[in-house]
Amino acid sequence: MNKKFLDLGYQPLANVYPKRYKLNQIKYKLKIQFNTNTKMVSISKRIPSKKMFNSSYPYRSSMSYTMKKSFKNLSNEIKKRFCPKILLEIGSNDGALIANFNKENVIGIEPCSNLAKITEKKGYLTYRKYWNYRLANELKNKHGEIDLIYSANTLTHISNLNDVFKAISLLLSRDGILIIEDPSLLECIKKISYDQFYNEHIYLFSVISVRNFIKKFNLEIFDLKNLETHGGSIRYYIKKINNKNIKVKNIVNKQILIERKFGLDKFVTFKKFAKKVELSKKKLLNILEKLKEKKMSVIGYGATAKAVTILNYCNINEDLIKNFVDTTPEKINRYMPGKNIKIIKYKKNSLIKKDYVFLGAWNFKREIFDKEKKFLKKGGKFITHIPSPKYFNKI
Ligand code: TYD
């Protein structure tokens, strides 16, 4: 049974950055629920994929050094540890991972044609299609079974999770490996990072829920890695249950014990989390309103989808955060969804004469602190809501 625990109000599509501010932008109620049987956390209203993932999708994996480095390291590990003949990536975005492989050995799946074009131009075979059972069948007929399937921050964006894993199970060879990585529910709850919830993030995985879910598709987790990416993610290494050549590592059960100890299998944990979210909103507004009273100049850094949730849930307007700066060409000179806050092209001197900077891209804190030493040296401060709203100038 699905039980709702958090109401984040009306939210616009997180990754649709309008050219002009529209007072009547379409918004959807964003409520978060916990399934008492499967232990899966998800959003209650599903928006059709075509509305979100189309030819103007602005998110680019290659926009940060942190992500590029993470994909490079993983590629090296995959080559050494699994030596796949063919790697298929579901949600290949602008090719941040596949760029590390030979063109003959990888297949990308990317429904957003603006992104698929980028990998195609570099000569990588890319299917401009949504991942589903029908596509898996088509691929199996064309390429045969695949020995390594990878997907980062994509499967949690697809509503029909049964179809997702049925398709994977069909295409994956008997000894094949599936590697997926997505934000961690445990980290979200620990960090009160309620901004992990927006209309694209349909599910927020825990090891408990993934293990429960994939069993019926003859799949099991045999290894895991905790990652710092996207504010705390988990990389799951998955195999077919009847492949007995690979042993399940202790870390899988250890992580499940940690999650159980934290209460990720109990509804009451999420009710408590919702109370903390309300408090977080009050504290953040308090900080921003005080800075406004003091006539401080405040801008945002990183026009993230996460920041869209915060701005709309907390009702933060241009009087509290004047602009956002961002490096993504697709976002520049557009507006933060739902708000009259313009996104400006990031320049080296963007933070000059700014007093406080709200970290929309808090998940890249280290990279940003490294880049903005001058701002910090001059007494500038960053504002974050993680794990509790505050301003700070040291990591
Ligand atoms: P990210 O946190 O990955 O995404 P989301 O919440 O949307 O899933 O997005 C990071 C955003 O921050 C992206 O628009 C690029 C931007 N950014 C900068 O502008 N400067 C930077 O130094 C970094 C690291 C990111």
Image (cartoon, rainbow, N blue to C red):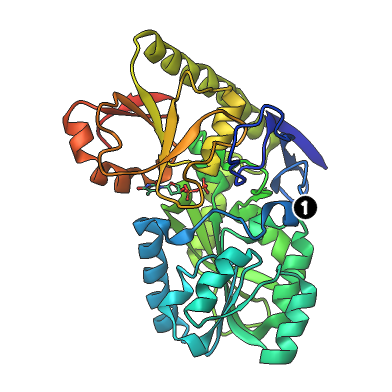
Where is 148 relative to 204, above or below?
below
From the viewer's side, name the closer residue of 157 and 357.
357
| Count of numbered tags | 1
The quadrant in which the C terminus is found is top left
Q: Amino acid at mark 1?
A: Pro
Where is 64 relative to 73, above or below?
above
Where is 87 relative to 342, above or below?
below
Position in image of residue 232 (x %, y %): 46, 49
Q: Does mark 1's beta carbon lie closer than 8 Å to ligand 1?
A: no
Where is 72 relative to 66, above or below?
below
The quadrant in which residue 363 appears is top left
Position in image of residue 66 (x %, y %): 36, 57
Decide if residue 324 is on the left or right side of residue 125.
left
The answer to whether residue 70 is visible is yes
- Circle 1 residue: 48
From the viewer's side, name the closer residue of 252 and 127.
127
- Look at 43% across and 41% down and name the residue there: 302
Q: Residues within 10 Å of mark 1 (few under 14, many from 20)?
A: few
Position in image of residue 373 (x %, y %): 20, 39
The answer to whether residue 84 is visible is no
